Image (cartoon, rainbow, N blue to C red):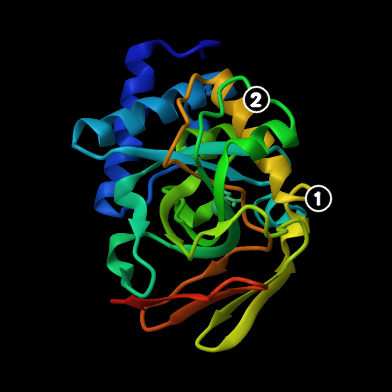
């Protein structure tokens, strides 16, 4: 096996993952048959998002993943990752999420940031905080394109870190403290996961610093209007058609959506 994939091989894998997402059909882990390094995987991720952009989707920000112990433990990987968001992944609060569009979707409670300025070159919490216009609660819907939701670090990065949809709550000015706020994810009115935003790297602000570093390393433009998802504060919850999913974050209006067939 080669040490580094060539561009054709990267494009091939990107197209395969893109098609798996479009057809909601699980595929075998790439790393089982192909030597995939982490830099290769980020390249594949970018190429697969480029396919979406070529179809008219607009980049809308970045998601951080595996930033809490609960998330790391759930998938057996303890390295933070990032993925790229597009406007087609945004689902309006109160709307419906069609289950048939996904393979095995899971919901997770997150804190999101709405940027007012570019993150380029910023490296500390006070610096990145000045680039933020508002903070919001968010539910991320992740959906691994791999069978049984099983993957290696490089596999999940190539698969755009399982990005599939996100639902944002009401934005609130950044003066509101978000370092340690209670978060409850309810399924049909019953608490399914309970946690705190502090589970995310000690504070979601650290995830924003990580986003700035990832953006510099992988040359991603993040600026006014873009959303940064800081990562699930608890384990993700598997969804089923018919459920009503609600996220309550202390100090914010609740977010709710229904999973339809
Ligand atoms: C990887 C994506 C992780 C998060 O918030 O930690 C993620 C996965 O769990 O499939 O989005
Ligand atoms: Mg997430």
Judge left or right: residue 126 versus residue 192.
right
Q: Position of residue 145 (x, y in %)?
A: 41, 48
Name the image quarter holding the C terminus.
bottom left
Mark 2: give few (<14), some (14-19) or many (20+) Cα within 10 Å: many
Q: Position of residue 168 (x, y in %)?
A: 46, 61
Identify the residue under disc 2: 122
Comes first in the chain, label 1 or label 2: 2
Q: Position of residue 30 (x, y in %)?
A: 46, 34
Secondary structure of residue under mark 1 = loop
User: Which quadrant of the figure has residue 39?
Assistant: top right
User: Which quadrant of the figure has residue 240?
Assistant: bottom left
Callout in the foreground (1, 2): 2
Mark 1: give few (<14), some (14-19) or many (20+) Cα within 10 Å: some
Secondary structure of residue under mark 2 = loop
212 or 46, which lies in front?
212
Location of residue 234 with respect to 247 vertically, above or below: above
131 or 35, which lies in front?
131
Which residue: 54% across, 74% down? 253
Judge left or right: residue 68 versus residue 221.
right
Disc 1 versus disc 2: distance between alpha carbons? Answer: 19 Å
Which residue: 66% across, 46% down? 66
Which residue: 63% across, 37% down? 130
Q: On residue 202, which mark appears?
A: 1
Q: Residue furthest left?
A: 55
Which residue: 29% across, 49% down? 88
């Amino acid at each position: 096996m080669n040490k580094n994939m060539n561009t054709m091989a990267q494009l091939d894998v990107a197209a395969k993952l893109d098609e798996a997402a479009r057809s909601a059909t699980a595929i075998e882990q790439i790393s089982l048959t192909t030597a995939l390094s982490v830099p290769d995987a980020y390249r594949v991720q970018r190429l697969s998002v480029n396919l979406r952009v070529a179809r008219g989707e607009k980049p809308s920000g970045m998601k951080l993943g595996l930033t809490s112990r609960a998330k790391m433990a759930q998938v057996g990987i303890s390295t933070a990752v990032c993925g790229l968001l597009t406007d087609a992944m945004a689902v309006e609060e109160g709307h419906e999420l069609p289950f048939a569009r996904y393979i095995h979707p899971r919901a997770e409670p997150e804190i999101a940031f709405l940027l007012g300025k570019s993150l380029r070159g910023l490296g500390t919490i006070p610096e990145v905080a000045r680039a933020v216009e508002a903070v919001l609660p968010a539910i991320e819907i992740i959906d691994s394109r791999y069978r049984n939701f099983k993957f290696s670090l490089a596999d999940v990065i190539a698969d755009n870190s399982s990005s599939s949809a996100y639902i944002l709550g009401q934005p609130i000015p950044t003066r509101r403290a978000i370092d340690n706020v209670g978060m409850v994810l309810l399924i049909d009115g019953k608490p399914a996961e309970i946690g705190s935003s502090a589970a995310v790297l000690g504070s979601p602000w650290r995830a924003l610093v990580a986003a700035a570093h990832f953006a510099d390393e992988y040359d991603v433009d993040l600026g006014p209007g873009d959303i940064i998802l800081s990562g699930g504060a608890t384990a993700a919850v598997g969804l089923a058609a018919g459920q009503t999913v609600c996220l309550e974050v202390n100090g914010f209006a609740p977010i709710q959506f229904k999973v339809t067939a």
